[in-house]
Image (cartoon, helix red, strand yellow):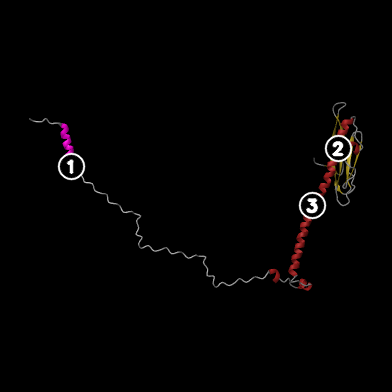
Amino acid sequence: MQLKEQPELNQINELSEFLAKTYQPYRPIKERKSVAKVDRTNLQPIQEPKSVARVDRTNLQPIKERESVAKTYQPHFYSINECIYGRGTSRIIELFVVVIIIGILAHIALPSFLHCGNKAMQSEAKQYLGSMNRAQQAYFADKGKGAFSNSITALGIGIKTQTTNYNYSIGATKNAAFSYAVSSHEKKNLTSYVGAVFLVPSSGANDAKTVSILCETNALGKNIQPSIPILQNGVPVCGDGTVEVSK
């Protein structure tokens, strides 16, 4: 009786034969040597480095105490003959140079210093006369009909007629009022001032306005009476010997 060929069995047999031919027995893998493994049998001990700051202090000598400069210094005083004919001549020249320099600086700075002091005193007069001008304009507006005040007290602004630096006074006409600040200082050369308020008719029959000006004298000194300003074409102008104070 013959067996029928089965293709599955043939495939299994072929696979078994292939595996039998290619079979390799298991071989253990050799342990690789470590790269970092070092022979430490011949290593030498590390020597401790010598300290750079180590100093032999056996032969050091004690430090001698230094004498004070104040104790050892002996000042030398030059006699008059030495100053004139000897070694002190250079010092006299230096002293003269210092005195000359101080004199030049004082000549430059002193006028500026005095001028600043004068400005502070003169600002008093300018402020007072400016207040008087405004008070006259207010007085005229209150009373009406072109009436100005002839009295500082009547203006009600609390200004004294005399201070350390100036004497104050006012005068008035129908169409103008004038205020004066005349220098009274004994030692300071101060500027004197004059203020004015003018009545200027307007286009209307009963309408009028007031304009003011403040002037100062060109000359400096005590008791210099400034000339009164005038009205030209409706514009107030300072009188002779005076200039308008910039606002």
Between the C-alphas of marks 1 and 2, the distance is: 136 Å
- Residue with the mark numbered 3: 113
**In this rendering, the label closer to the viewer, 1 or 2:** 1
The residue lying furthest to the left in this view is 1
Between the C-alphas of marks 3 and 2, the distance is: 31 Å
Q: Does 41 sit left or right of 21 as displayed?
A: right
Q: Where is residue 244 in the image (x, y as percent from the top left)?
A: 83, 41
Give the residue type at disc 2: Asn
Q: Magenta stretch: dominant SS?
A: helix
Residue 132 quadrant: top right
In the image shown, does 228 or 134 lie closer to the viewer?
Answer: 134
Q: In which quarter of the image is the C terminus?
A: top right
The residue lying furthest to the top in this view is 205
Between the C-alphas of marks 3 and 1, the distance is: 125 Å
Q: Does the magenta stretch include residue 16?
A: yes
In the image shown, does 16 or 81 lie closer to the viewer?
Answer: 16
Q: Give the range drawn in magenta.
A: 7-20
Q: Which element type, helix, strand or loop, lies under badge 1?
A: helix
Image point (84%, 42%), residue name: 126
Mark 1 or mark 2, earlier in chain? 1
Say which mark, if any, is on residue 20: 1
Question: Are circles 3 and 2 on residues that touch, CB within 8 Å?
Answer: no
Q: Is residue 169 magenta?
A: no
Task: Decide: is 209 above or below 217.
Answer: above
**Is residue 234 in view?**
no
Crowdedness of circle 2 by 10 Å Cα count: few (<14), some, many (20+)? many
Residue 146 quadrant: top right
Q: Which element type, helix, strand or loop, lies under badge 3?
A: helix
Say which mark, if any, is on residue 133: 2
